[in-house]
């Protein structure tokens, strides 16, 4: 199908921008409505699967994304206190660069900037900021969108890419908020020159303690070290997914970890110390109603223990654009997209929960780990360009 009026994408994150760019490449006009006043540097390190990277290559971002990312090394899983190896391997430096044959680490902001620039290059008016969705109404062959600034927009199709607290999702299905998953994540970034004495010559490691893990790896051509710790917790009271964190709280959560961990946290810039609660939604049997469809975390948030959230968002955008290009109408396209994606998303969702249970339930004083994320290679091999579409 081909549309002459712009499709509306709600949300200018990775899911929204990937979907928008894929639709542009397929010849569809697109408008992206992002609630923040300015698109800027948000987040830290993320993992791109090889399939997601190859899909980005078809959108014209292959060389730039490769240049901005690093191959994921084999990862060692260490005893939180002694740094003894529990699973995986200790690898100094990076492996040989095999392009998109292997997963890669990238700063989320770098990938986001590449996507935003390419969407804007295709259409300088494609992205509108300061647009917080407040209402959605379907009527006939169009969807009417109302924004908090009082503006109204009509679009033939709407794609909800507005994250785990999606307004679009709440208008389509129910308004129940996501559930706290009993986990709090902590993050910081450290310049590599300051972190070097505490890396032991190894680019990527995960420290494992009962109920807590801490992952650290290099990004931005090895100039930054991304540190992410996840700890079990009974409650989460802060608002937002990215809240400034006091250094003392971060240190307290991991104060019995190896001295290298504590030294890394001590060298993080105050404005890079972030915390956020992990949340989950009930699984939806479908992701579309009428002329509106969900992608990314708005449709299917997953826990981060396998590092595949960003890849799922990219995969959604690619598969949805393929379905819209090949189907005769929106219902057929949305049905094909959902059919192609549900099994993949459910596999990752369940595996991510299981991986967290394995690692956080481990007693490192009694032995190794049952499994390590690096062993789940099949999960990273999915190719959204080859996913069959039932049309």
Image: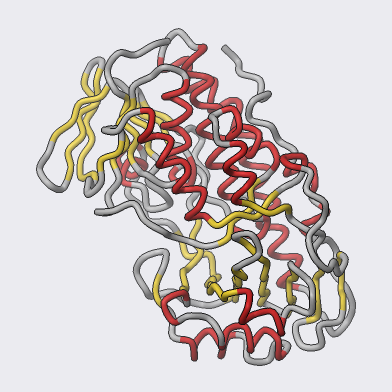
Residue 82 position by quadrant: bottom right
Name the colour scheme: secondary structure
Please tell me which residue lies in front, 362 or 150.
Answer: 150
- Residue 247 appears in the picture as rendered: yes
Position of residue 295 in the picture relative to residue 229 (left or right) = left
| Residue 224 point in image, percent of width and height | 59, 68
| Residue 225 point in image, percent of width and height | 62, 70
Q: For the point 20% across and 29% down, which residue is it?
A: 144
Q: For the point 26% across and 33% down, which residue is it?
A: 125
- Residue 186 appears in the picture as rendered: no
Residue lying furthest top in this view?
328
Please tell me which residue lies in front, 190 or 13.
Answer: 190
Q: For the point 88% across and 66% down, which residue is it?
A: 89
Please tell me which residue lies in front, 373 or 201.
Answer: 201
For the N terminus, give its image quadrant: top left
Residue 339 position by quadrant: top right
| Residue 14 point in image, percent of width and height | 47, 45
Q: In this view, does 16 lie above or below 157?
A: below
Please tell me which residue lies in front, 336 or 311.
Answer: 311
For the C terminus, give its image quadrant: top right
Position of residue 337 in the picture relative to residue 347 (left or right) = left
Q: In this view, does 195 lie above or below 95?
A: below
Q: How many labels does the image show?
A: 0
Q: For the point 37% across and 53% down, which residue is it?
A: 165
Q: In this view, does 66 lie above or below 375?
A: above
């Amino acid at each position: 199908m081909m549309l002459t009026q712009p499709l509306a994408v709600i949300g200018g994150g990775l899911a929204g921008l990937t979907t928008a760019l894929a639709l542009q490449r397929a010849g569809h006009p697109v408008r992206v409505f992002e609630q923040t006043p300015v698109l800027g540097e948000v987040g830290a390190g993320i993992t791109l699967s090889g399939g997601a990277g190859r899909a980005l290559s078809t959108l014209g971002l292959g060389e730039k994304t490769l240049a901005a990312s690093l191959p994921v090394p084999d990862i060692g899983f260490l005893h939180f206190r002694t740094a003894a190896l529990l699973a995986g391997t200790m690898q100094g430096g990076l492996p040989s660069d095999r392009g998109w044959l292997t997963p890669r680490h990238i700063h989320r902001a770098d990938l986001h900037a590449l996507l935003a620039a390419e969407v804007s290059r295709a259409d300088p008016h494609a992205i509108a900021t300061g647009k917080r969705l407040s209402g959605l109404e379907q009527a006939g062959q169009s969807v009417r969108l109302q924004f908090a600034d009082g503006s109204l927009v009509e679009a033939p199709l709407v794609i909800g890419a507005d994250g785990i607290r999606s307004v679009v999702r709440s208008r389509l299905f129910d308004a129940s908020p996501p559930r706290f998953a009993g986990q709090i994540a902590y993050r910081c970034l450290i310049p590599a020159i300051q972190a070097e004495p505490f890396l032991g010559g190894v680019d990527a490691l995960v420290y494992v303690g009962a109920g807590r893990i801490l992952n650290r790896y290099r990004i931005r051509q090895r100039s930054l070290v991304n540190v992410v710790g996840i700890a079990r917790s009974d409650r989460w009271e802060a608002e937002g997914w990215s809240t400034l964190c006091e250094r003392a709280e971060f240190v307290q959560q991991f104060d019995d970890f190896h001295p290298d961990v504590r030294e890394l946290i001590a060298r993080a810039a105050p404005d890079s110390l972030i915390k956020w609660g992990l949340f989950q939604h009930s699984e939806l049997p479908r992701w579309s109603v009428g002329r509106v469809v969900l992608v990314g975390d708005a449709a299917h948030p997953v826990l981060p223990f396998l590092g595949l959230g960003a890849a799922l968002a990219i995969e959604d955008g690619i598969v949805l654009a393929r379905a819209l290009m090949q189907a005769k109408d929106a219902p057929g396209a949305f049905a094909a997209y959902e059919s192609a994606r549900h099994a993949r998303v459910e596999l990752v969702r369940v595996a991510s929960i299981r991986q967290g249970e394995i690692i956080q339930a481990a007693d490192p004083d009694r032995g190794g780990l049952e499994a390590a994320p690096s062993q789940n290679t099949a999960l990273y091999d999915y190719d959204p360009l080859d996913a069959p579409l039932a049309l």
